[in-house]
Image (cartoon, helix red, strand yellow):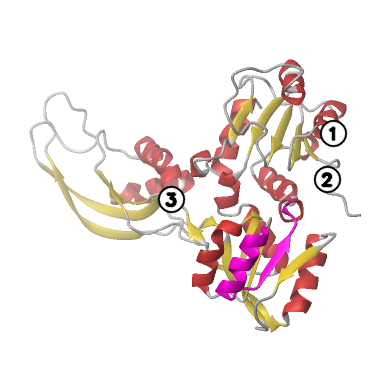
Amino acid sequence: MKVKNLLNNLDKIAPFFLQESFDNSGIQFADLDTPVTKILLSLDVTQGILDEAIENKANLIIAHHPLLFSPLKQITKQKNPLLYQIITGQINLMAMHTNYDLAEGGLNDYVANLLGIKKITPLQGSSEKVFKFAVYVPIQHADRVSQAIFKGGAGKIGKYTETSFNISGKGAFKPMEGTNPFIGKIGKREEVQEIKIETVVAERDLESVVQAMKDNHPYEEPAYDIYKLKAKPSYGIGIFGEIDKEVEISKFSLEAKNKFQARYIRLIKSNNRKIKRVALCTGAGGSLLEQVSRKDADLYITGDITYHAALRAKELGLNVLDVEHFDTEKFFVEALYEQLIKFGIPKDILIKSKKMESPYQML
């Protein structure tokens, strides 16, 4: 497997175009034609992580946080020692940041499952487009084409797959000179019993679905339609959901601390409501306080809440559980590891970093 093959798999897990405009997910440094030896998964890229990669003979690091956020005009060993070592040591580097935060089955979904939160909706929907895809197929070939487009990614609605609506009808066409018709004769109008297969396709899968249809359709010129829908994907920034039973806020907070394996947590308590409806945004989610308020959440779990954001939460009547950024996002490693295994990446080339650590010390 080459680096470019792995990059394609990562793009399927969490399409890079989903990332926020300020972000720099994707390739940081790479030779796309280099065979992958071993892959180190980590939250950040630090000197300790680079040393760990070298010790394990890994030639690829996949981190959640990008090492490169802004353009650089020059790289020197003195000013950019870590980046310099990565480049000169030919360590390929990729980041899965906000694209993985937004993606279905990404980091927020993993942590929500850890905390027992059943997802209802994202806090802020993704900007990815959704399309209606329809194709007209001779009856005897309908099953083959259906399976091909489903394999290409069509028909996904929430946790349901292979969804479609089929309509029987009569198709008509007249092949002209220069054609090579599968059915009918040149110059003669032909009528065929066909099935119209309608389904939905996310923007990321549209190209592969169209190609899968063409590769498996018997017609020289298949007839198909694509419509942009107003419907929004079921994924986006953060999560709003519910836990099974109401619980006291202090009890839930301490249980969450244990599940996060956090050294400390901070509670911004604005009321004594029992906890049932929970909002979550891993990392730094102070900018989403207004969205959370509109969801009428009993508790908002996030990190990096500043003093003034805490005061604003009080004004909004929100209970906020402030968990250290590191403790909400360290699960990136386990979450991506599980997904890479599902994509057929061998376990023996995947390494979960053991040297990740928070930059803060408790005194």
- Crowding at dot 1, Cα within 10 Å, few <14 / some 14-19 / many 20+, comes out as some
Does the residue at mark 3 contact the one at mark 2 (Cβ under 8 Å)? no
Q: Could you tell me the amino acid type at mark 1? A: Gly
The front one of 133 and 4 is: 4
Q: Residue 357: which disc?
A: 2
Q: Name the residue rendered at 21%, 33% in the picture.
A: 181
Residue linked to disc 3: 127
Whether 159 is drawn above or below 244: the answer is above
Q: Closer to us: mark 3 or mark 2? A: 2
Screen quadrant of the C terminus: bottom right
Can the viewer see residue 278 in this picture?
Answer: no
Mark 2 or mark 1: whose residue is earlier in sequence:
1
**Relative vertical location of residue 295 with respect to residue 226 in this rendering, above or below:** below
Q: Is residue 349 visible?
A: yes
- For label 1, the residue is 48
Distance, label 2 to label 1, CA atoms, is: 10 Å
Task: Tell me the distance, in whole angstroms, between the alpha carbons under discs 1 and 3.
Answer: 36 Å
Magenta part of the protein: which range?
305-325
Q: CA distance from mark 3 to mark 2?
A: 33 Å
Residue at 63 percent of width and 17 percent of height: 74
Q: Where residue 184 appears, x then y in whole percent?
A: 17, 37
x%, y% of residue 169? Answer: 20, 57
Instruction: Say whether marks 1 and 3 touch (CB < 8 Å).
Output: no
